[in-house]
Amino acid sequence: MTMTSTPATGDRRAIRQALADWRAEGRVAAGSVARPWAGTEPEAADWHRWLDHALLALGTVLLCAGVIVFFAFNWQDLHKFAKFGVLAAAISLLAGFALVRPGGDMAGRAALGGAQALAGVLLAVIGQTYQTGADAWQLFALWALLAVPWALAARVAPHWWLVIVIGNVALLRYLSVRLGVGGMFELLFDARHARTTTLLLLGAVLFQLALWAWLCAHAAAFGFRGQTGARILAAMACFHAGFVGLSALFANRPDLSAFGLAALALLALGWWFRQRAFDIVVLSLASLTGIVLVVAAVGRLLLEGKADFGAFLLLGLLTVGMAAGAAAWLMQAYRAQAVELS
């Protein structure tokens, strides 16, 4: 095997696993994989680059947190125009700093991320200063829209992660209001329309996941790259599918159609991230959610109207068996992917 370039982090892990398996099986001698193995390990420059990026991201987060704390502490003492002026000046300084930096510079991109976050703070300050009675979903929706130009300017994936999270929070709040649900806790724990809301959210997240995959294939130059964006959306999809399935099972009358839709969504996620865009993290999340739904369904059947110790024992054994089977399947899939990459 010839290593022509330094692989990505996920590919390095897969190649290391394949080499370890081959050596354990005796298919290759230990000394014959020394050079390929060395190519899969991070070098000192990789660690330096990672530390630079981590400290830069931490500094940006602390800067934004400092601005928020400043306003919280001095809210009563600042005139409303002073509040707007300070935030506008901070955003302008960050944007100007990013403008004078060379293209692709990490410091400039971090400044754009700070401006992206402070745009939301500015909207919150405007909302607190002028009480118009608007709902919180409008704040998050406008913030998501304002975050898009900053993400286009930065052209890196982390800026799009923020857009994804803010946009889905706005969508969650919007659906809860439109369907007559009072608040987020009522939506999650005590709402008549919670299942309908979560089904709509599940469909929206699956659509976003398909859109993200398409953008990664056709618009990678704008920052649609990497696995984290898909993982964020897939984690949301697993949560929504799990909530739909559990609420369908434990309703007064079990809703088998909603439970089937949740199971179908999990199967679709498993197929896509196994066959088309392999990701062991998403497969693990989907497997965990599936185990929870299966155990809950069996528990509903066994414990209907009674609480038997043998039923609990059977549920425990079922959980252990399914967890072991899922772990074995995940390891087999990971090793098969490692062999393909190698």
Image: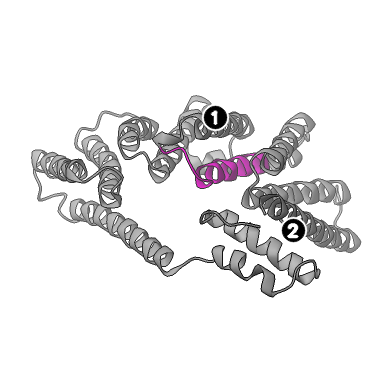
Camera-side residue of 62 and 57: 57
Q: Quadrant of the C terminus?
A: bottom right
- The stretch in magenta equals 223-243
Image quarter in which the N terminus is found: bottom right
Q: Residue 109, relative to residue 181: is it above or below?
A: below
Residue drawn 23% across and 45% down?
102
The image shows residue 255 at horizontal and vertical percentages of 76, 32
Q: State the residue in front, 235 or 283.
A: 283
Query: Is residue 339 positioned above or below 30 on the image?
Result: above
Secondary structure category for the residue under label 2: helix
Q: Amino acid at mark 1?
A: Trp
- Report x, y in % for residue 42: 49, 65
Q: Which residue in the rendered view is the most extreme toward the right? A: 310
Snapshot colouring: one colour
Q: Kindly identify which numbered label has been placed on residue 102.
A: none
- Give the residue drawn at x 70%, y 44%: 274
Instruction: Please state if 325 lies on the left or on the right of 219 as rendered.
Output: right
- How many C-alpha atoms fall within 10 Å of the one at disc 2: few (<14), some, or many (≥20)? few
Residue furthest bottom in the image: 31
Where is residue 245 shown, x and y percent of the image? Answer: 71, 40
Give left or right: position of 280 versus 215.
right
Is residue 78 a member of the stretch shown in magenta? Answer: no
Residue at position x 25%, y 35% from top?
127
Residue 324, x across and y down, in percent: 80, 61
Q: Is residue 117 left or right of residue 304?
A: left
Q: Decide: marks 1, 2 in contact (CB < 8 A)?
A: no
- Magenta span: chief secondary structure: helix
Q: Quadrant of residue 81?
A: top left
Read off the residue under disc 2: 331
Viewer-proximal residue among 298 and 37? 37
Label of residue 214 in the image: 1
